[in-house]
Image: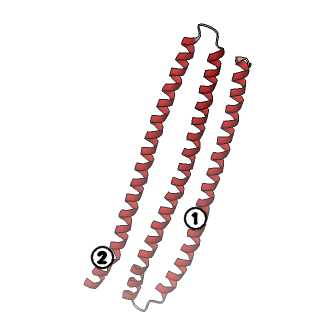
Amino acid sequence: MFSIPEQFSNATKANFESQFAIFSSLTNKTFEGVEKLVDLNLTAAKASLEDSSAAAKQLLSAKDPQEFFSLSTAQAQPSAEKAIAYSRHLASIAQSTASEFSKAIEAQILETNRKIISLVDEVSKNAPAGSENAVALFKSALGSANAGYEQFTRTAKQAAEAYEANVNAAVNQFTAAVKSAPTAANSAAAAA
């Protein structure tokens, strides 16, 4: 049978190891997200450079101002669509990384709570007579903390969902505006 100080020492060691594991996991998730972001930016920069070069060649080959403006208008929509695709990919990386963080933290908190409850139960079995009220008070406080965490988790998930919905709505509005812009520009050019 273990003494209470030894039980707390073992629990503290296990908690430290668990926190180190979650820190390592979060660090790995962060590097994965940064790696995806760097890859996305390098790909976007390379594509942008190639597109800019091709666009400049086309614009320089224009024979008159009307052809120049027609080419400029025609190039605007693909550029905007690429910007939209980039924004969506960027949002996807951010959302994926945040989701992985959330999952890792939730798992850590659940495991820590499980260990604390197990430790409290074990200690309460070996607690001296008359300490039942203190153990009950601690268990009540632990239950309240868990309820608060669950409420915080629900609120954070709702905020993340609202943010994602707002980003999607903004991207959809921008997409609609981009799709209607060439039509409006062509109508204005035809009227002139």
Residue in the image at 57% along x and 16% along y: 135
Front-most of 106 and 130? 130
- Amino acid type, mark 1: Asn
Give the percent coordinates (x, y) of residue 177.
34, 68
Q: Please indicate whether residue 86 sits to the left or right of residue 67 in the image.
A: right
Residue in the image at 62% along x and 51% along y: 29
Name the residue beneath numbered marker 2: 184
For the N terminus, the quadrant is top right
Q: Is mark 2 on a helix, strand or loop?
A: helix
Image quarter for residue 11? top right
Image quarter for residue 39? bottom right
- Amino acid type, mark 2: Ala
The Cα–Cα distance between marks 1 and 2, rounded to whole angstroms, is 31 Å
Image quarter for residue 112? top right
Tell me which numbered mark, 1 or 2, is placed earlier along the sequence.
1
Task: Give above or below for 67 relative to 113.
Answer: below
Q: What element carries label 1?
A: helix
Any part of residue 100 in sight = yes
Residue in the image at 70% along x and 36% along y: 17
Name the residue beneath numbered marker 1: 41
Residue in the image at 56% along x and 78% along y: 50
Residue 177's tag is: none
Q: Residue furthest left?
A: 191
Give the percent coordinates (x, y) of residue 35.
63, 59
Give the percent coordinates (x, y) of residue 13.
72, 30
Query: Callout 2: few (<14), some (14-19), or many (20+) C-alpha neighbours within 10 Å?
Result: few
